[in-house]
Structures are given as structure tokens and as C-alpha cells.
Image (spheres, rainbow, N blue to C red):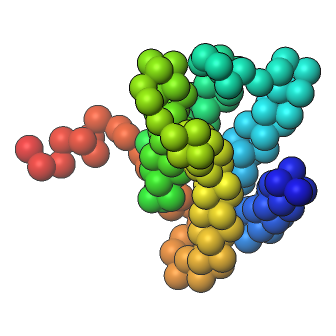
């Protein structure tokens, strides 16, 4: 049941991102799909709940770093929120690896909920984007970090 729900949320966020979102939203959807497909490979690798799940840890670090770099260059706030959510999942792996006592339900919630929250966040953001595209130029979705723009206040 959980797998069907995650497939449905993934499909909805992917369709909405590619139909109503801008380029940053399409890149975010691609990040989500890449992480999901990589996590499906876990069926062949196996899941480790005794110690650090290296494969899951790498997937969550990928999600965190990809959304963080998207947040650096996209003129959107949601990639920063997405990277913060993914950081929760990375922290769950580290808590488990350091063998800090934690309730198993809290560990599973910290580990899996951020992925669902990022997909739901992407759907919500894409619902707002058509209004944004009517009000703001479509080319203004990327931040330019040139040396002249960083010296404005000097």
C-alpha cells in the first residue's frame, strides 16, 4: 500500500511539475524521480536496519546536495525547504549510525517522511507557478552570481 501511495505521489508531482512548473521545478521533479528509482534498486541490494544503511544514506545525501545546489541558483525558496527536509533524512541516518537511542517509529518517520513532503511541496509550488508566470518574466527563475552583483553594497 505504501509503495502504491508513493508511486501515485511521484506521478502526480512529476506531471504537475512538467505541465505547470518552470525549469527549476522540472529539475526538482527529476531529482525526486532519480532518488526514487535509486531507492527501488534497494530491492536488489537489500536494506540494513541494524547499522548505517549506506545505500539509503547515499540517496539522501544526493537529494540534499542536489536540492541545495538548486537552491543556490534558482530564484525560488522551495529548493531550500526541500534541502532542509532532506537534511532531516540524512540526520536520521547519522543518528542511527551513531547508535543514539531513538524510537524506531521516529527513525522511520525521519527517514522516509521528507521524501513525501518534498513531493507534496513540489505539487504545491507548481500550483502557484502559473500565476507567477503571468506576473513575472519567465527568464527570471535563475540567480546570477557575478562579481559585479556581489559588490553592489560597497
95 sits to left or right of 23: left
Foreground pick, 17 / 53: 53
Task: Report the front residue among 89 and 76.
Answer: 89
Quadrant where the image shows the C terminus:
top left
Give left or right: position of 103 versus 145: right
Q: Is residue 146 above or below residue 57?
A: below
In which quadrant of the rendered view does residue 38 lie?
Answer: top right
Residue 118 place in picture, x, y as percent: 61, 55
Residue 129: % across, % down: 61, 73
Whole-percent x, y for residue 135 in the image: 53, 82
Which image quadrant for residue 5? bottom right
Q: Residue at x 73, y 37 (%)?
A: 35
Point 82% across, 54% down: residue? 2
Residue visible at 70% across and 42% down? 31
Q: Is residue 94 visible?
A: no
Residue 17 lies in quadrant: bottom right
Q: Position of residue 94 (x, y in %)?
A: 48, 25
Amino acid at each position: 500500500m505504501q509503495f502504491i501511495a508513493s508511486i501515485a505521489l511521484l506521478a502526480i508531482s512529476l506531471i504537475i511539475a512538467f505541465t505547470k512548473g518552470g525549469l527549476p521545478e522540472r529539475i526538482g521533479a527529476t531529482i525526486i524521480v532519480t532518488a526514487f528509482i535509486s531507492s527501488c534498486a534497494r530491492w536488489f541490494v537489500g536494506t540494513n536496519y541494524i547499522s548505517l544503511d549506506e545505500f539509503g544514506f547515499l540517496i539522501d545525501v544526493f537529494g540534499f546536495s542536489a536540492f541545495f545546489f538548486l537552491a543556490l541558483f534558482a530564484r525560488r525558496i522551495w529548493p531550500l525547504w526541500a534541502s532542509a527536509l532532506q537534511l532531516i533524512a540524512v540526520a536520521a541516518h547519522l543518528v542511527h549510525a551513531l547508535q543514539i537511542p531513538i524510537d524506531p517509529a521516529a527513525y522511520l518517520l525521519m527517514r522516509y517522511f521528507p521524501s513525501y513532503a518534498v513531493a507534496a511541496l513540489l505539487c504545491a509550488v507548481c500550483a502557484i507557478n502559473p500565476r507567477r508566470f503571468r506576473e513575472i518574466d519567465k527568464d527570471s527563475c535563475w540567480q546570477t552570481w557575478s562579481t559585479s552583483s556581489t559588490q553592489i553594497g560597497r
